[in-house]
């Protein structure tokens, strides 16, 4: 069931938070053994939270905007007193000492925190196969990946185990799993949502956002998550609009650009057909469609896979076996303590990225790689700035294909990196983007439409997504609805 | 190149097995091929780009409600200190 409906029903007393929770725990018992969306289900904590919400209502207190809504959290978000593994062996047993800013906000709106979801280790991956614990399966086809790195969050919402989930997006990690699982996935603008309490991967790119079944839920979630936070200096002080209020405004007069660099030969024909069909729906609803160009798109993947690992190699230096997480038992001296704790604790993709990041920052290579990539990023950002003088929105595929099979790309890092080709540019520019389901291919797998708007124009994204969703409701299979 | 991978691993304080070093060595040449795409861009086009505004705040000390919970995350400690192996013999 949708988060917005649950919150309304719990607030009006139509259903209790405990009933809602028990339904979702029932879905977890049925689906989780096959899907593997969670690293930890917080059953005891969730029951206490649901009970507290019901008690609050009984006492006549005003309930929050997420009253009784079961929310799943990607396991890189800290919940005080609960283990945060970030999908990594190195953090196994790491119990968070404080709540992430977004967790505080969810709690203050009476959400019920249901569990921590599976993810690619340290959010590095596009399939959730890089989890140190187990891969997550796509509920639409258990032989396929759910996307990544927020694949656990996507899978949990898809089969009704959670009503809403939070993910994090560095190069597409909310939008691509949303596309692969038929959900709405929103990456807010850089600075819109506080990252305090999010385990850092690449700090100039990381953003937290919701995965939901509907645009209404995404708008509700963003209204709660967005806003200034003194504990994240990159978090913007800009005021937060009422995102739910724009949902009925339609797209009449909105100018929508199709960047030609996102529709090159080689794009999966069914993805292209479905995305172009969605654009036609927007046109029929009154949007003006035109072709535009973002000429530096082709450099984005290379620049991203230089910058993100560079930042990661620095952010992950803190896992040294001294202050957090795993310490190697076989170290004989301090140097070995660092090397062995890290060598034994990190998985293959994380090591690969630490090595790449260290390399591109090392003496003699920094100019050719890191500095050059930073400037390429500036060009990509300028492309978007120019194009948003002409259009309000961009429409593109979210991913070049629908969900791929488990194992299909896991031995070839470059082909895995290229699966982020359409989500990376918006991450590099730091603007707002969203994926909304726009069709199902012949194999029965969802296809995502990506909408991109200028910085802090989330309301435009949500307005267009909502109009599209109303005109073309997405056929979600019965067995996934709770 | 295996020596190069080892050198980088040393800088990153990451112990690699021989198998891992060989695997990464092979993969890196493909990844560096991908990276070489940006070397095609001419320098003048790049001038003046890439400055990310630095957002800094005053470095004020604020009390944390539960410092013991933070220190308690360490794998080994003694009293109020983190315990590590001998630095010098």
Image (spheres, rainbow, N blue to C red):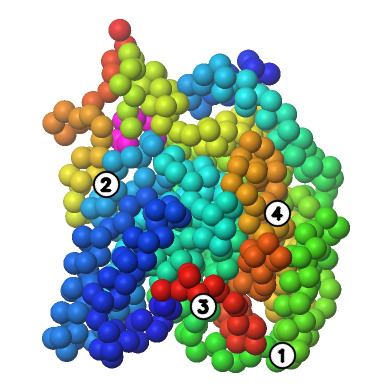
Apparent side of residue B63 relative to residue A353 in the rendered image (left or right): left
Which stretch is magenta? Answer: A319-325
For the point 25% across and 55% down, which residue is it?
A80
Apparent side of residue A246 relative to residue A296 in the rendered image (left or right): left
User: Residue A305 bears which disc, if any?
Assistant: none
Apparent side of residue A366 relative to residue B86 in the rendered image (left or right): right
Judging by the rendered image, the residue that carries numbered circle 3 is A214
First in sequence, mark 3 or 1: give its number: 3
Residue A324 within the segment the image draws in magenta? yes
Q: Give the structural element (helix, strand or loop) at label 1.
A: loop
Pointers 3 and 1 in contact (C-beta within 8 Å): no
Tell me where residue A255 sits by quadrant.
Answer: bottom right
Pinpoint residue B34: horizontal percent, then vertical percent.
Answer: 75, 39
Apparent side of residue A235 relative to residue B19 in the rendered image (left or right): left
First in sequence, mark 3 or 4: give its number: 3
Q: Chain of mark 1?
A: A
Q: CA distance from mark 3 to mark 4?
A: 25 Å
Front residue of A62 and A164: A164
First in sequence, mark 2 or 3: give its number: 2
Q: Give the structural element (helix, strand or loop) at label 2.
A: loop
Judging by the rendered image, the residue that carries numbered circle 1 is A285
Residue A55 within the segment the image draws in magenta? no
Placement of A482 over or under A471, stated as above or below: above
Front residue of A296 and A235: A296
Judging by the rendered image, the residue that carries numbered circle 2 is A95
Placement of A182 over or under B45, stated as above or below: below
Judging by the rendered image, the residue that carries numbered circle 4 is A421
Q: How many marks?
A: 4
**Dominant SS type (magenta):** loop
First in sequence, mark 1 or 4: give its number: 1
């Amino acid at each position: 069931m949708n988060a917005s409906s649950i919150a309304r029903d719990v607030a009006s007393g139509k259903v209790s938070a405990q009933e809602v929770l028990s339904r979702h725990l029932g879905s977890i018992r049925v689906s989780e053994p096959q899907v593997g969306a969670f690293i930890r289900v917080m059953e005891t904590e969730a029951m206490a939270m649901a009970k507290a919400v019901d008690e609050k209502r009984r006492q006549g207190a005003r309930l929050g905007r997420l009253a009784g809504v079961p929310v799943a959290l990607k396991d890189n978000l800290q919940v005080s007193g609960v283990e945060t593994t970030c999908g990594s062996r190195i953090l196994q047993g790491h119990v968070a000492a404080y709540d992430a800013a977004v967790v505080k906000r969810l709690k203050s709106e009476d959400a019920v925190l249901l569990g921590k979801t599976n993810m690619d280790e340290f959010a590095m991956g596009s399939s959730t196969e890089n989890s140190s614990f187990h891969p997550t399966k796509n509920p639409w086809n258990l032989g396929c990946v759910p996307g990544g790195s927020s694949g656990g969050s996507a899978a949990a919402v898809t089969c009704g185990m959670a009503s809403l989930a939070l993910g994090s997006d560095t190069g597409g990690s909310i939008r691509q799993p949303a596309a692969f699982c038929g959900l709405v996935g929103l990456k807010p603008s850089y600075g819109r949502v506080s990252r305090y309490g999010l385990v850092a991967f690449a700090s100039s790119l990381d953003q937290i956002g919701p995965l939901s079944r509907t645009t209404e839920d995404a708008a509700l979630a963003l209204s709660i998550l967005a806003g200034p936070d003194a504990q994240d200096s990159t978090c913007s002080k800009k005021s937060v609009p009422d995102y739910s209020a724009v949902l009925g405004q339609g797209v009449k007069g909105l100018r929508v650009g199709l960047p030609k660099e996102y529709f090159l030969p080689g794009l999966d024909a069914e993805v292209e057909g479905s995305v172009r069909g969605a654009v036609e729906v927007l046109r029929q609803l009154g949007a003006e469609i035109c072709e535009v160009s973002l000429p530096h798109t082709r450099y984005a993947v290379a620049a991203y896979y230089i910058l993100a690992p560079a930042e990661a190699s620095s952010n992950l230096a803190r896992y040294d076996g001294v202050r957090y997480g795993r310490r190697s038992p076989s170290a004989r001296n301090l140097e070995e303590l660092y090397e062995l704790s890290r060598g034994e604790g990190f998985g293959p993709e994380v090591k690969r990225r630490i090595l790449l990041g260290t390399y591109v920052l090392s003496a003699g290579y920094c100019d050719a790689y890191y500095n050059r990539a930073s400037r390429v990023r500036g060009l990509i950002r300028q492309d978007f700035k120019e194009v948003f003088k002409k259009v309000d929105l961009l429409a593109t595929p979210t991913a070049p294909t629908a969900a791929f099979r488990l194992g299909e790309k896991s031995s070839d890092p470059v082909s895995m990196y290229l699966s982020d080709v359409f989500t990376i540019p918006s991450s590099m520019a730091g603007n707002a983007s969203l994926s909304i389901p726009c069709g199902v291919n012949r194999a029965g797998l969802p296809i995502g439409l990506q909408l991109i708007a200028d910085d802090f124009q989330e309301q435009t994204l949500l307005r267009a997504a909502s109009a599209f969703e109303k005109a073309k409701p997405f056929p979600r299979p019965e067995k996934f609805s709770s | 190149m295996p020596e190069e991978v080892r050198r980088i691993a040393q800088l990153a304080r990451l112990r690699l097995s021989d198998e891992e070093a060989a695997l990464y060595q092979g993969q890196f040449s493909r990844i560096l091929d991908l990276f070489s795409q940006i070397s095609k861009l001419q320098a003048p086009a790049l001038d003046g780009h890439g400055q990310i505004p630095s957002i800094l705040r005053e470095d004020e000390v604020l009390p944390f409600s539960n410092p013991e919970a933070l220190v308690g995350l360490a794998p080994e400690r003694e009293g109020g200190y983190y315990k590590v192996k001998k630095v010098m013999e």
